[in-house]
Image (tube, rainbow, N blue to C red):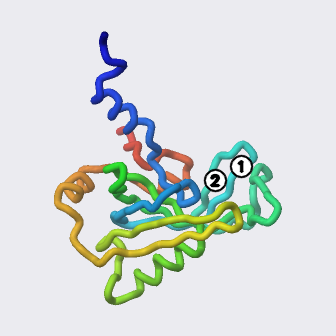
Amino acid sequence: MSPFLNLSDVEEIKKESQSNYISPTKITEEVRLRILGAGVTGFEGWTDDNKPVRWQTKPEKLPANIKVQDGYPPIKRFLAALVYSYESDSFKVLQVTQKTLMEQLFKYYQDIDYGDPVNYDIKISKTGVKKETTYTLIASPPKALPSDILQRYEEFYCNLNNLFDGADPFTQPTV
């Protein structure tokens, strides 16, 4: 009898089905990441049909289709960065709206022993649910990015500014 699938096919399917984004709200266990290059920041809201809308500056007036939920602001400040995910051995966009994670990252960023987060790995974890959720960010001691990952990054395309247009940051423009 033939096997159900070749193991190489299974690995390829698993890789294709993984999201290109990491949202702290969706993590179920600690993730280890390395921030790569310049990040972007702005404001984000969600439409009634669950589509994100992002602005570089805070809009004076929100579009009518922005979802409003009791107890939650209609838009939040976000920061996004291209990261290397050790778990999936791939490049992803990390998007953070949680103030506690931003504050923890900024403390390391301003610490003379750590500095720019492109120089060290970070570990993000989450406990709790809904409004009782707690996020934690811990930095590993600074060390060089492994050369094989650095080489892959230098050949990788990502334009985080595409987030503001609703476009895929991994899609290269056509000439």
Q: Which disc number belongs to residue 47?
A: 1
Q: Is residue 1 left or right of residue 125?
A: left
Farthest residue in the front direction? 1
- Residue that mark 2 sits on: 53
Q: Amino acid at mark 1?
A: Thr
Within the image, what quadrant is residue 110 found in? Answer: bottom left
Q: Secondary structure at mark 2?
A: strand
Q: Residue at x 42, y 74 (%)?
A: 138
Q: Position of residue 135 (x, y in %)?
A: 56, 69
Q: Measure the alpha-carbon separation of dots 2 and 1.
A: 7 Å
Q: Position of residue 13 (x, y in %)?
A: 38, 31
Q: Position of residue 107 (x, y in %)?
A: 46, 84
Q: Secondary structure at mark 1?
A: loop
Circles 2 and 1: CB atoms closer than 8 Å: yes
Indicate the quadrant containing the C terminus: top left, top right, bottom left or bottom right. Answer: top left
Q: Residue at x 21, y 70 (%)?
A: 144
